[in-house]
Amino acid sequence: MQRTSNLRKLVFTGLFAAIIFIGISMLRIPLPALVGKPFIHFGNTLMVLAILFLGGGYGFVASAIGLGGFDLLNGYAATSWLTVLECAVMAIVVSSLFKAFKGAKRPLSVGQIITISVTAGVTKVITSYLVSIVEALMVGTSFKVAIVASFLSLTSAAINAVSTAIVVPILYLALRGAFKNRV
């Protein structure tokens, strides 16, 4: 029984990794920025869903493979390690909130899912800002300029955060019945 459960989690981890990769590859809208080459995409939304359905560990692996793999294959290889770190932070934040709300072993309420989604969006903006600073420093920008330029480059992160806060509750509530006894 335990072996079947682990196999299911591995299969769903691979499935989520593929969905995240495809979600970024198929729909992305590049935006101009002072630091990096940001774009609007649904990878973060799908990452949060993976963490909610698979848990922090397997959700992290799925998002690291999906988002990190995209970076490696699409011209972002030098900063793919930063993407994986963002995935780790997001897995810790989202799974911690999920566990805090799930303490009574009841289904999460709409308000709790919205809280998790908004927190994930805010976390993404913060991690994107920090990643942009590191990216700017990697190319030789001074620290003060990196801080300002990174702040001015947060447009796509903010849009991605808003889409995460809106789309995650909708998809989670629509799909949680399907995942209830599967993972």
Image (cartoon, rainbow, N blue to C red):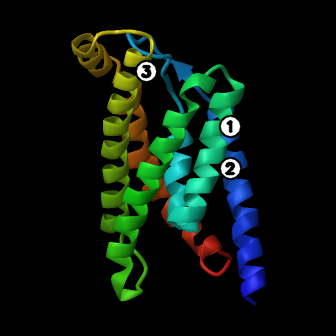
Residues at circles 1 and 3 in contact by the CB criterion of under 8 Å:
no
Determine whether, in the image, residue 179 is placed left or right of residue 118.
right
Mark 3 Cα shell of 10 Å, populated few (<14), some (14-19), many (≥20): some
Residue 78: percent from left, percent from top: 58, 23
Amino acid type, callout 2: Ala
Mark 3, residue position: 135
Of helix, strand and loop, which one carries label 2?
helix
Of marks 3 and 2, which one's residue comes earlier in the chain? 2
Q: Residue at x 54, y 21 (%)?
A: 29
Report the residue at 33% width, 36% height from top.
125
Q: Earlier in the sequence, mark 2 or mark 1?
A: 2
For the residue marked with disc 3, what is the amino acid?
Glu
- Return the residue nearer the eye: 153 or 140: 140
Question: Where residue 147 sits in the image (x, y, percent)?
Answer: 25, 19
- Please determine whether, in this image, residue 96 is positioned above or below residue 101: above
The CA span between labels 3 and 2 is: 25 Å
Q: Name the residue that disc number 2 marks.
A: 17
